Image: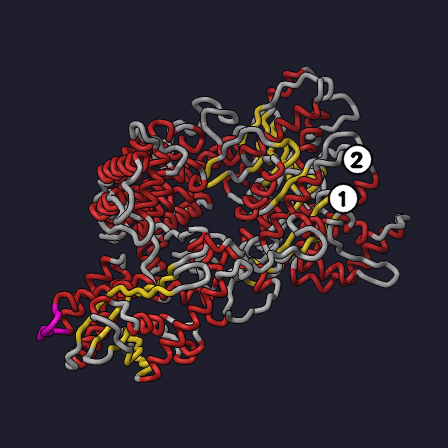
Amino acid sequence: MTGGRFDPFAGSGPRWRAVPAWRPFLEDLAAGVLNWLGDAPPETLTDATILLPNRRAARAFSFALGKLAGERPVLLPQVRPLGDLEEDEPPFAPGELGLDLPPAIAPLTRRFEMARMIAEEFEPGMKPLRALEMADALGAFLDSCQLEEVSDLSRVATLAEQDLAEHWRESARFLGLAVDAWPKRLEALGLVDPAWRRATLLRRLAEAWDARPPQAPVIAAGSTGTVPAAADVLRAVAKAPQGVVVLPGLDLDLAADAWDRIDDQHPQAALKALLARAEVAREAVQPWHQPPLDPAIEARGLARQRLINEALRPAEATDDWRREIKRLRARSAEAGRAADPIAEGLSGLTVLSVRAEEEAATAVALMMRESLEHRTPDGRPITCALVTPDLQLSRRVEARLARWGIVADSSTGQPLSRMTAGVLVDLCARFLAEPLKPQTLLALLKHPLVRLDLGETSLHDAAEALEEHALRGPRPRRWSQLHERLLKAAEPRRGGLPLADWKLARLKSAQTLADRLEALATARPCPPDEAARTLTALIEALAGQNAWAGPDGEAAASLLSALIEGGGPLGPTTPAEFADLIAALLAETTVRTGGATHPSLRILGAIEARLARADRMILAGLEEGVWPNAAPVDPFLSRPMRAALPLPAPERRLGQTAQDFVQAACADEAVLVHCERRGGQPAVRSRWLWRLEMLTRGADAPDTPVRLTAPEGVADWTEALDAPPPGPARLAPRPAPAPPVERRPRSLYVTGVERWVRDPYALYARRILNLEPMERPGASAEALARGNAVHKAIERLTEDWPDLLPDDLDAVIERLLLEELGAHGFEDAAMAREAPLARNAARWLAGFETERRARGVQLLIEQQGALTFDAPGGPFTVKAYADRIEVGALSAAVMDFKTGQVPTAKQIKAGFAPQLTLTGAILAAGGFKDTNGPVPPEELTYVRVVGRKKAGEVAVRAAGPEAQALSAAALEGLVARVARFDDEATPYVSWAAPQFMGSYSPYNLLARVWEWHVIGGGEEGEAE
């Protein structure tokens, strides 16, 4: 090349060069290549081979090369990823290397075959999901051994003979058998492991280039050589006639004593090991071509790199921090620079502390959005990149950017389980496992890809009818029960008009839909390949071929195809186990959709960002356990066992992530983000952030103040983004509607009167607005259902045995209780809890019934009574369904059965629990026809049936004249209340008696109780 131009191959080999961490690596690499090319014809560059760590780096370098070339015609060199070489592509010559190697086994097939081997040869009968987990761990162990080129795996078996804990010896015995059996399984398949094939190709390339160095230009850039074979390829490249290795972020200024103390967790650990393997001194590494930058930017970059490297120096060398700070300041003064080097390094570096992950995502999204409003001095838009290993945080940021219609270029992709096709596959698998689970069934029917032809009625209408009439409330346990609910919904209401034709049509379509779904629910225990075929048929029956469209559909089709092809050996699985298997596979499958993304915004993982650079770098997730993550735990090998093989220590991964942090933090503008809490628990700041803060505190002095500051305005933006408008909070007032008198109810049951006393607004919503609460689909049978079941069981006992009681009374009552609990929606899991309670309750009820029947009274069960009186707005009727009335010769006992807490005598006297007293008043007025006239109430009693340690309780709340007086007083109070509410000025206030409301009412949200009563601190109010 012409004089004065950069020549990367100058001098005799080996040639090692480095790009400082503060420089943009790929841009400098491209600039150096173009400067070396000079005025040579474009085809000169096509002879060169450039090796980069991965495919993303290769694409980014090609983009940078084209961008820097501008209008100059340049033919791209042969850019290849060192981590994914193929023998039919350069730098391999056709037929030279690797053609004798068998193909690599597909990842999913490898998992299934390995799981099959474990289940068949080592752990017969193991569940498929557990076998796959063990296969993953075994595969990771073999990958590490193959990449590290541990040649003699037979030594694993000898570890079992060492003095180790029993579980480690068992792991070693298993590994010893597995490392012998797995190669035989691969040989029978004619395949090899991908990691072994990759390491073998690299090893052969290194040996070939050692023996016959390439004559064409070769540049290996960006790799740290953590894989031994890759390190030897780099060494061979450096010795080639036109070969050079370009290292990322090598610290050429770190003190020699600190360099000697570097351990596995240091950012320079991998580079130090690479240089030691290549037998190259750090002093022999030369800088790569550096295009000129603004002097201020260059000075700031050098200071930043020095600051970060000093903060992360080995722990044993941190005692020199103060001395090193003084040395840096002295050197800066000698150079005639007025700026303090520590403060200069902190220029453009800010730290943002937020409370939790949600706030972190909002702050990051705002900074990325704000960067789009600015431009560089040369007029181009500012680029911004989020770098984080926290996938959840990156997805939260994507969701927040979507509110502004911004889609960032994300390298992380999306798990298939979160995408449309993946959700459909998961729902179908869960439907096969539990076809009558309402939540799964409704989610499946409402999935956007599902299409079913139901004739004149749409799938939407049929699904709505199925939900309303068959799936709300306790889940059906059989298809016949679901059909019974639909048939019952189509029956004419007692005393009402027949159903409209359109409602009947919807119910008919719901029946057709239920028939179709029942026919599709054909799952049974079978091997995963057969279950996958059944699942595929179900998906296509519901969604057709559209299910496999798009990137997510293709990924779902590939997953199921691999499962059909390789899932047979896993052995029989139940539908529930297969659904769990599908959910795990979907969560592990990542789909990268590409598409239209914003050219200035990127979201990168730590590894993907190693060589990338943007004008603003946001480093998030800086908490211990996230970045850096904890050292991985090997489920098979302890640390001494790993060292005996030998395998690298787990801490080596920490050094690699530390280098990723340094590369990103040395950007001209870098924002470090960390959360004070994660998952609701206090979080510990990243060790790197702690060290940086400690260093800056040590450098702080009165004459040279040094501070780590927060990015200006970001905290305020985050707080204000979704904050309410300024000024006092506009809270909803306590509702107090006052409808016209003619709209107010003229009849109530005694339970409605009790609601009226405690919460008039609930009565207004139910009886005047006609808002009836709907049960949740598949709602679990709770207290109300248990009470109804107990009531029905006692009613059936009286109907079946009106006079004489059976000898096995307790067994009869237990059977009735269990039957009614099942009929009221209690599932098998709940019945396991309810059965012993029913047994205890049956014994207690048997004694109770025997004692009460011995009195010779007449039993009235679930009898309806009514009493009408005049009021200002017209006649008013109070009605009651009495659980039980025991009629004697001159008086009667009024009973109500409860399974929960019973009202106290104080509440009854105060009028807050008028159920028994008003029933007694109706009885005294002759409102129950089977009593043949008025009967004074002699006893007002609650019978509490629970079945626990105290199985039951008879709570007599009033007896004799007191019962009659309380009943008369309750009726007088009701007459007065009706008269008061017959005045249009009397409102139906919410929570008139909050001290008796408890915490739940179906109308609390409608009344906005939390807003006016809790947040607003509203007064509790007084009983009317």
Indicate which disc residue 57 carries.
none
Q: Position of residue 1013 (x, y in %)?
A: 57, 64
Report the residue marked by disc 1. Answer: 301
Q: Position of residue 603 (x, y in %)?
A: 59, 40
Q: CA distance from mark 2 to mark 1?
A: 10 Å
Identity of the amino acid at label 1? Gly
Of residue 289 and residue 69, the one placed in the foreground of this image is: 69
Residue 807 on the magenta span: yes
Identity of the amino acid at label 2? Leu
Q: Indicate whether 410 appears above or below 75.
A: below
Q: Position of residue 775 (x, y in %)?
A: 37, 53
Q: Indicate whether 45 appears above or below 932.
A: above
Secondary structure character of the magenta stretch overall: loop
Region rendered in magenta = 801-809
Secondary structure, mark 2, is loop
Q: Indicate whether 784 appears above or below 361.
A: below
Q: Position of residue 817 (x, y in %)?
A: 21, 66
Q: Quadrant of the N terminus?
A: top right
Hey, which quadrant is residue 27 in on the image? Answer: top right
Hey, which quadrant is residue 243 in on the image? Answer: top right
**Residue lying at 84% horizontally and 53% vertically, measured from the top left:** 340
Mark 1 residue crowding within 10 angstroms, few (<14) / some (14–19) / many (20+): many
**Residue lying at 89% horizontally and 51% vertically, measured from the top left:** 334
Q: Tell how many labels.
A: 2
Of residue 754 and residue 672, the one placed in the foreground of this image is: 754
Report the residue marked by disc 2. Answer: 293
